[in-house]
C-alpha cells in the first residue's frame, strides 16, 4: 500500500511540474463507467452469439451479415446512460488548467467529451456519430437505438453505418498524424486503461521521446519495462487522488 501511495505521489508531482502532457487511453478507463471491455468477457457473448466479438465487429461481417452485426452493436456497444468517471473528469480539468494538450483514445463512447475535454483524438471513431453510406446524412446514437434490423436513412433509404473503425478497416490518416504530433511533442505521456494489444493504435507510443512515460493499468502491458512510473491499479481510483 505504501508503494502504491508513493507512486501516486510521484504522479502528482509530475502533473504539477509539466504543462505538456498527453494521455493515451483505452477500454480500462470506460469500464469504470460501466462499459464492459468485450475482450475480457468473451464467454458472456458466446452465450448469445454464434461468433466472437472480433468477427462480428469486422468489415466483412458488417457487409455479409448486417442484421446480426446491428443486433450485437445495439446490445453490446451502445451505453446511452454511461457517465464520465473521475479519470475522464480529471483529464478534462487538467486540459482546462493548461497542463494536458490532448487525449488520444481507442474508445468510441464519447465520455471524454462528455466530461468536458476539447482536444480528443478518437482513433477508432465514435458511436455518437452515424452516417448514411450513400448521401452522408448524419444520425445520432438514439436513431440507431430506436431503429430495428438494419438502420436506414430517412432521406434516401440506404443503410446507416456507425462512424466506428471496424476490424479490417484503416484508421483515419488525419487523426493518426495529429496523434503522432502530440505524442512526439509531449513532455509526459500517460498511458491508461489499455493493454496496448490493438495495433496500429498501440504502435503510436513509439513516437514518444519526452521526459516521463507513465503507465497506469490493472494488468501488465508490453510497455511496463519502459515506464518511468508504473501503477497497476484502476485508473479512476488513481486519478481521483490527483
Image (cartoon, grey):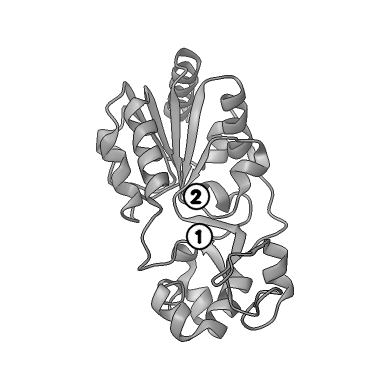
Kindly state the secondary structure of the residue where label 1 is placed: loop
Coordinates of residue 177 in the picture (x, y in percent)? 35, 41
Is 169 on the left or on the right of 66, as rendered? left
The one nearer the camera, 171 or 26, is 171
The one nearer the camera, 188 or 167, is 167
Q: Evaluate if marks 2 and 1 touch, with contact meaning CB atoms under 8 Å apart.
A: yes
Residue 180: numbered disc: none
* Res 147 → quadrant: bottom right
What residue sits 52% from the left and 21% below the top?
A: 99
Disc 1 target residue: 37
Alpha carbon of mark 2 to alpha carbon of mark 1: how far? 7 Å
Is 2 on the left or on the right of 118, as rendered? left
Relative to 101, is 70 above or below?
A: below
Relative to 72, is 217 above or below?
A: above
Relative to 201, is 50 above or below?
A: below
Is 1 on the left or on the right of 136, as rendered? left
| Total numbered labels placed on residues in the image | 2
Disc 2 target residue: 28
Coordinates of residue 83 in the picture (x, y in percent)? 69, 48
Q: Residues within 10 Å of mark 2 (few under 14, many from 20)?
A: many
* Res 134 → quadrant: bottom right
Coordinates of residue 35 in the picture (x, y in percent)? 59, 57
Look at the image and tell me whether residue 91 can be seen: yes
Amino acid at each position: 500500500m505504501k508503494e502504491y501511495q508513493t507512486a501516486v505521489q510521484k504522479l502528482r508531482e509530475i502533473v504539477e511540474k509539466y504543462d505538456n502532457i498527453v494521455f493515451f487511453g483505452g477500454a480500462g478507463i470506460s469500464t469504470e463507467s460501466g462499459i464492459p471491455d468485450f475482450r475480457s468477457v468473451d464467454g458472456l457473448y458466446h452465450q448469445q452469439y454464434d461468433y466472437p466479438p472480433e468477427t462480428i465487429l469486422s468489415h466483412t461481417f458488417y457487409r455479409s451479415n448486417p442484421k446480426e452485426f446491428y443486433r450485437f452493436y445495439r446490445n453490446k456497444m451502445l451505453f446511452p446512460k454511461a457517465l464520465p468517471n473521475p479519470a475522464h473528469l480529471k483529464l478534462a480539468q487538467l486540459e482546462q488548467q493548461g497542463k494536458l494538450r490532448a487525449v488520444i483514445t481507442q474508445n468510441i463512447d464519447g465520455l471524454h467529451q462528455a466530461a468536458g475535454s476539447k482536444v480528443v483524438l478518437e482513433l477508432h471513431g465514435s458511436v455518437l456519430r452515424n452516417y448514411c453510406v450513400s448521401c452522408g446524412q448524419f444520425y445520432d446514437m438514439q436513431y440507431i437505438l430506436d431503429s430495428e434490423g438494419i438502420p436506414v436513412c430517412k432521406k434516401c433509404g440506404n443503410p446507416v453505418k456507425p462512424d466506428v473503425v471496424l476490424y479490417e478497416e484503416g484508421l483515419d490518416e488525419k487523426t493518426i498524424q495529429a496523434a503522432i504530433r502530440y505524442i512526439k511533442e509531449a513532455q509526459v505521456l500517460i498511458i491508461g486503461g489499455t493493454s496496448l494489444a490493438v495495433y496500429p493504435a498501440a504502435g503510436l507510443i513509439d513516437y514518444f521521446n519526452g521526459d516521463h512515460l507513465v503507465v497506469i493499468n490493472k494488468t501488465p502491458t508490453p510497455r511496463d519495462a519502459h515506464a518511468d512510473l508504473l501503477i497497476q491499479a484502476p485508473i479512476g481510483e488513481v486519478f481521483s487522488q490527483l
